[in-house]
Amino acid sequence: MSNPNSVVTDLLTAFPQWRSQMYFKSSLTALSHAMEDQVLAGDEQPLIIASFQKERFYRQEAHRYQRIGRISPHVYVLAAPETEFSSISDVYEKIAFTPEDELIHEWHLVVIAKHYANCLICREKTHHPKTQASEIAMDNSRRFEGIWTFDRTVSQKSAVILLKRIVNYRPELKGKIDEALELYCSDIDNITSTPLEFSSSSNPDPFVQRLVTYLQAGQYKLIKANRFLSVKEKKERLLNSITEAIRRSLDPDQILQVAVDKLGEGLDVCRCLIYRCQETDLNAEIQHEFLNGKIKSIKGKSWPVKANPLFEEVLTLRESLSIDDVSIDPRIQNNKSLLSQLVNSCSIISWLIVPILYQGKLLGMMELHHCDSMPVTWKPEDIALVDAIATQVGVALIQAESYANLEDLNEQLEALDRTRSNLVAITGHELRTPLSTIQVCLESLANEPDMSPELRQVMLSTALEDAERMRKLVQDFLTLSRLESGTVEWNPEPLSLQECVDLSLSHIRSRQDQSNIPSINNFILDSMVLVEADGEWLVEVLSKLLDNACKFTDKKGQIIIQVEEKNPSQLKVMVSDNGRGIEPEKLKQVFDRFYQEEGALRRSAGGTGLGLAICRQIVKNWGGEIWAESQGKNKGSQFYFTIPKYTQKSTSNSNNTKKNRRSSSQQNLR
Ligand code: ADP
């Protein structure tokens, strides 16, 4: 039943000398209302055929057809049903056509009366996709092509074409339609020879012609204005969304990636780049890139800056530089060594370079490339938009930088605070005790000349011992403070674990009487066991653990040093003894600053109470862990720490880490 033919095409085939014309939807609405009003105002019973694309368009006019239907028995209304429209004989005849019928793309109105006839036979042109904001504007700018005329023959032919379609859908109306054809179309002349000029009887009011022209012109202006507004609105929305997104982050990388993505997408360029650079840089690394389609990526590449005349020009002018067509730009064509090569290797056709400045200081550059075959003219409003975004990015970068500085400052303050509390603790508890002893000893020596030489010796030795304890305490305290405040320069390198253990053992042996220390069994004999650490600090950890093991183990006891693989990238080193042991609830506490089981005043083994806190800081630095295990009092203790194994890869990583680390003056451990 549905008809794949267009009524417009059928009509133009019948009248090859007629040309179709373009009409906006609003013009067709005005024309069809005028045609319907003519029927309503007259006293004739004309033939009226109205074909709506969809039921919803019909519904807007249904009230008019209720009135028109009462004027004439020959009123036919066609529409593609959406909800309740159906083929039925009502006040007028309704014909529901199928969605496959070409009528769905067309808008027709035919009126044939005794003294006048006119028709509007149009087909919708495929129109632009709708955007949410401009949907109404776009609806009014829908375009149709076809014929609107007062010509009776053309109107009659249109009626014949449409009535035939109606019979197809509603065969029961055949008799009525034959009657309509007889009544309104029987005098149809030799249709192909119909002249284009209007006959005097059908000459419409020239006012109507002018009305149409005026309507069309007005519609054109409206569409142009709408288009301008919608482009402006789109750009404003883009700027707002970029500003909002970049202001939400304090991470410079995220800010730049959001900006590059949104800008590239919003302006529909082939490639959008952002790179950070300073005026004096030779090259910059392309860190952020947006690509549209199959464009070659240059992310991570080094981009010439200093030797690039375009970059220099942007810097001098302090503003953006646009090149519509690189193939005719003398700056590029005359610079074969660099610019022509860049253009070719990156397939740049049109180029826009915009500086990211903050208070005149260069923070980076934004570049937009068109790489399609045709050059693009950079519109001033697009350049202004990119400029505005570059300003926002500049502000956001400075904000992020200030925030990072603030965080750094906070960290330093926290470290200072830790040092301060350490200092309070050390002077309050730890230094006062040996100092008082020294003072008592020296006072006794000074005030009691009769003191026996043996007692003098005891007094002097005690004072010296406590002075040494104070020296160690101050030294450990300073080491811990430096470790906690992050001012230590680390130099990780591949090391033989065995050599480091040997070095620590020789420290211990040189300091203590061999007969007073337990036997030490070192099972790390393979010099090929390589670790990745700073040697000085590794020896420090081993020495402190061994020192403790000796201190808290009877000289008849035994100390064992062992290593095993914890996982493919880490080793687990153990220093174990069968000495005094640690209560299970104290296993974590021993790593706290100034923790000593007996308390500072009753210490028997000497020591500062800072050794394990220092070890924990050192191990933390190489990303390891340190912990103690013990079965309890007098059951011995095992101290473990993990350390990265040396691999080829870890060297290159550590070199990078080394480079990035904050440098400070070289510190000596002892
Ligand atoms: P200290 O200078 O007192 O040794 P550390 O921080 O090195 O300070 O150790 C803190 C405390 O942990 C020690 O005073 C001791 O009570 C306990 N400790 C450390 N190592 C051992 C060990 N091998 N056996 C038993 N207790 C230990």
Image (cartoon, rainbow, N blue to C red):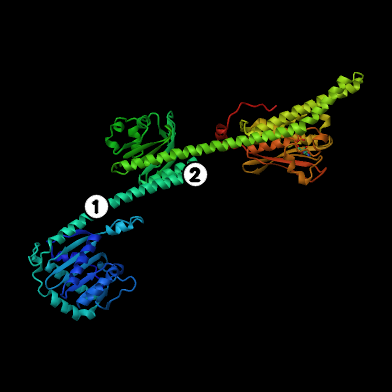
Q: Quadrant of the N terminus?
A: bottom left
Q: Name the residue located 31 percent from the left edge and 68 percent from the top edge.
A: 56
Which amino acid, mark 2?
A: Ser
Which amino acid, mark 1?
A: Lys
Q: Is the residue marked by circle 2 packed among few (<14), some (14-19), or many (20+) residues within 10 Å?
A: some
What x and y, as percent, mark residue 78?
25, 72
Marks 1 and 2, how far apart at CA:
43 Å
What x and y, as percent, mark residue 157?
15, 70
Left or right: where does residue 227 sit relative to residue 73?
A: right
Q: Is residue 3 above or below residue 644?
A: below
Query: Which residue lies most toward the front here?
Result: 41
Q: Quadrant of the C terminus?
A: top right
Circle 1 is placed at which residue position?
A: 221
Please tell me which of labels 1 and 2 falls first in the chain.
1
Q: Are marks 1 and 2 in contact (CB under 8 Å)?
A: no
Q: Nearer the viewer, residue 491 or 121?
A: 121
